[in-house]
């Protein structure tokens, strides 16, 4: 976040510098407001670029065996351009390299799921998926399973049969 702030600040300084050069080249005939206006345009452009490029940068760093299962897009009145081009605000990834099936209950898959969201801390959640019944349970403290897959201390959450995170965990993408 600090680097993005510095990049936006530098873009503003660069925009102001362009405005100053234009005023100098036109022998100060260009209006004075051009300098802060170009600084603002530079900062806004850098900010928009940063917002739209975080997800492609995240995608570029996904290692083999980790499946991008789902993304969430959003709009905001504070960013009116997002109504024309919605912004990817979150991504759900399933690490199929670490997914494990229970030999006593082969329809159960234990897999780490990562949630990445813009301006939020990344979260890794260990999830047990029931592929046959389209449901999941987050493995938190106190949740246990027997060898046959009987849950104790947690609640199964029903999922849609076509849920992309469920599909990624059960079928590897």
Image (tube, rainbow, N blue to C red):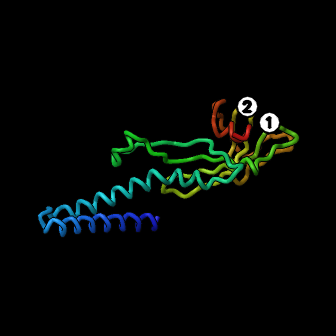
User: Is any atom of residue 22 visible in this view?
Assistant: yes
Question: For this view, does 44 lie left or right of residue 173?
Answer: left
What mark, if any, has residue 107 been given in the picture?
A: 1
Identify the residue shown where x is 29% and y is 63%: 15
Image height check: is 157 above or below 49? above
The spot of residue 114 in percent (x, y) is 63, 51
**Residue 43: percent from left, percent from top:** 33, 60
The disc at residue 53 is none
Badge 1, how many Cα within 10 Å: few under 14, some, many 20+?
some
Residue 7 left/right relative to 95: left
Looking at the picture, how far across and down is residue 25, in whole percent? 19, 67
Q: Nearer the viewer, residue 12 or 128?
A: 12
Marks 1 and 2, how far apart in space?
A: 9 Å
Picture layout, residue 147 above or below residue 120? above
- Confirm or deny contact between disc 1 and disc 2 (CB under 8 A): yes
Horizontally, residue 121 falls left or right of residue 49, namely right
Local SS, label 2: loop
Mark 2 lies on residue: 133
Q: Quadrant of residue 151?
A: top right
In the image, residue 51 sits, relative to residue 136, either above or below, namely below
Question: Which quarter of the figure has residue 82?
Answer: top left
User: Is residue 139 in view from this perspective?
Assistant: no
Horizontal arrangement in the rendering, residue 86 relative to residue 13 (left or right): right
Of mark 1 and mark 2, the one earlier in the sequence is 1
What residue do we see at 35% from left, 48% from top?
79
Determine crowd level at label 2: few under 14, some 14-19, many 20+ residues with C-alpha closer than 10 A: few
Q: Residue at x 55, y 43 (%)?
A: 71
């Amino acid at each position: 976040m600090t680097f993005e702030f510095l990049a936006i600040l530098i873009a503003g300084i660069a925009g102001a510098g362009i405005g100053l050069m234009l005023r100098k080249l036109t022998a100060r005939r260009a209006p004075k407001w051009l300098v802060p206006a170009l600084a603002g345009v530079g900062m806004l452009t850098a900010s928009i670029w940063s917002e739209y490029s975080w997800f492609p940068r995240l995608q570029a760093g996904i290692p083999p065996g980790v499946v991008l299962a789902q993304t969430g897009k959003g709009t905001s009145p504070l960013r009116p351009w997002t109504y024309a081009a919605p912004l990817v605000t979150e991504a759900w990834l399933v690490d199929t390299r670490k997914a494990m099936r229970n030999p006593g209950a082969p329809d159960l898959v234990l897999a780490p799921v990562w949630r990445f969201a813009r301006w939020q801390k990344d979260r890794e959640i260990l999830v047990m998926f029931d592929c046959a019944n389209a449901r999941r349970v987050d493995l938190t403290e106190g949740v246990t399973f027997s060898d046959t897959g009987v849950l104790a201390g947690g609640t199964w959450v029903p999922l849609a049969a076509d849920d992309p995170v469920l599909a990624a965990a059960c079928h590897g993408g």
